[in-house]
């Protein structure tokens, strides 16, 4: 009896291969689309989270600019005898606009920088040697480890003096400490008044903010920028400390300042740093941050049909030459002590 052969013919085999290729292409397309979506979502999440943290940090510091331990600084008569005066001049906020290369804070050229000056969060009561006005000040305990040449503030919320400590006080936990203010590091050795027992001593802090190069690179070799802070802290002897990275992904920081030009303690106009003539008129700071993700080739570059269109507050289209996702965030922060 003749056996019947069974199996695929050439036509059936070609159809099966074609269907297999089509199915494989569909799977690959879904995989690529999913991977692209994940990269976009990861970049967006990074940008939003980093922007939230950066704005929170900057906002907290800006709101407290000019703090002198009192509810309002508008009516306090403040005297500065510390020298050099430029290191401790009482201006709550001060900024520089579109800095050039080689600037003092090593900021990325074209970005803005911000300096905030204020009293420390904590204070210590004074206890002795109150009169006369050139007497050394005694505090109950040097718990914040104030050192020689530190900048300190003494105030009773009516009057305030900023001076530089000229002796080496006892350390924390060693009992009463003396803070001398001779003319060795001050323009004179007398405070503006004789303070009573209600006066307090604060560290007088100066903090800078700038966008700097972290020294790290993306996978494609592009520099990673970040927001940095640099401070003259207590126990530093009045020396500017090293720059500390706050959060990466900040590509640009642009600032404008709300000015009170008629003395009614409300903002009348916003100007960039170069246009501010009296920094004591500043009541608020508008912060604009351009955030960028590290992952490259996530969105279309400038000129591509799928290019990401991102505009700053002035309506300028941001150039994208690396395919990294960008977003611009803007917030306004009032200087609380200037509004009361």
Image: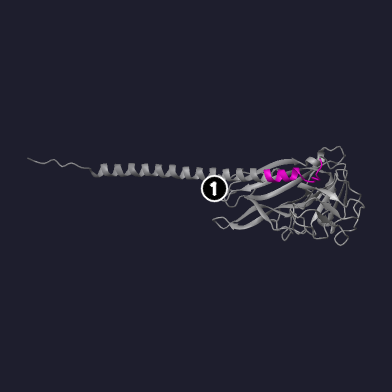
Q: Which one is nearer the viewer's eye here, 331 or 316? A: 331
Quadrant of the rendering where the N terminus is positioned? top left
Q: Residue at x 64, y 43 (%)?
A: 52
Which residue is pictured at 50% across the width and 43% down the height? 38
Q: Is residue 339 magenta?
A: no
Drawn side of residue 288 relative to residue 166, left or right:
left
Please tell me whether residue 182 is drawn above or below residue 199 in the rendered image.
below
| Numbered disc total | 1
- Coordinates of residue 332 in the picture (x, y in percent): 73, 40
User: In the rendered image, which residue does mark 1 sit on?
Assistant: 298
Q: Position of residue 142 (x, y in %)?
A: 77, 53
Q: Is residue 287 visible?
A: no
In this view, the residue in front, 6 or 191, is 191
Q: Name the secondary structure under disc 1.
A: loop
Is residue 202 rendered to the left or right of residue 40? right
Q: Measuring 89% from the left and 55% from the top, which residue is drawn there?
A: 135
Residue 64 within the magenta-colored segment of the rendering: yes
Q: Is residue 163 visible?
A: yes
Residue 257: x and y in percent read: 78, 44
Q: Which residues are magenta?
A: 56-70
Residue closer to the observer: 207 or 38: 207
**In the rendering, at what x and y percent does residue 71 appear?**
81, 40
Q: Residue furthest left?
A: 1
Circle 1 packing at 10 Å, graded few (<14), some (14-19), many (20+), is: many
């Amino acid at each position: 009896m003749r056996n019947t052969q069974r199996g695929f013919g050439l036509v059936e085999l070609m159809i099966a291969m074609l269907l297999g290729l089509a199915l494989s292409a569909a799977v690959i397309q879904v995989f690529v689309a999913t991977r692209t979506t994940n990269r976009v979502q990861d970049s967006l999440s990074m940008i939003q989270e980093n922007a939230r943290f950066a704005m929170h940090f900057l906002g907290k510091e800006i709101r407290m600019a000019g703090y002198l331990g009192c509810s309002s600084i508008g009516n306090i008569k403040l005297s500065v005898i510390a020298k050099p005066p430029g290191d401790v001049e009482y201006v709550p906020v001060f900024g520089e606009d579109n800095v050039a290369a080689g600037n003092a804070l090593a900021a990325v050229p074209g970005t803005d920088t911000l300096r905030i000056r204020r009293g420390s969060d904590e204070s210590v009561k004074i206890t002795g040697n109150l009169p006369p006005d050139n007497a050394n000040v005694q505090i109950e305990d040097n718990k914040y480890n104030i050192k020689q040449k530190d900048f300190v503030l003494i105030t009773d919320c009516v009057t305030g003096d900023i001076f530089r400590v000229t002796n080496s006080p006892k350390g924390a936990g060693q009992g009463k400490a003396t803070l001398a203010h001779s003319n060795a590091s001050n323009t004179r050795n007398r405070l503006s008044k004789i303070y009573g027992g209600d006066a307090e001593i604060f560290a007088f802090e100066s903090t800078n903010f700038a966008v700097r190069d972290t020294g790290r690179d993306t996978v494609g070799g592009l520099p990673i920028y970040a927001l940095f802070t640099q401070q003259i802290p207590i126990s530093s002897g009045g020396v500017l400390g090293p720059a500390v990275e706050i959060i990466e992904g900040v590509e640009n920081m642009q600032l404008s300042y709300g000015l009170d030009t008629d003395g009614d303690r409300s903002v009348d106009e916003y100007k960039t740093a170069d246009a501010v003539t009296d920094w004591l008129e500043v009541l608020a700071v508008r912060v604009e941050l351009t955030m960028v993700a590290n992952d490259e080739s996530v969105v279309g570059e400038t000129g591509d049909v799928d290019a990401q269109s991102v505009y700053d507050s002035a309506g300028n289209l941001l150039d994208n030459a690396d395919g990294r996702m960008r977003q611009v965030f803007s917030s306004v922060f009032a200087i609380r002590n200037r509004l009361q």
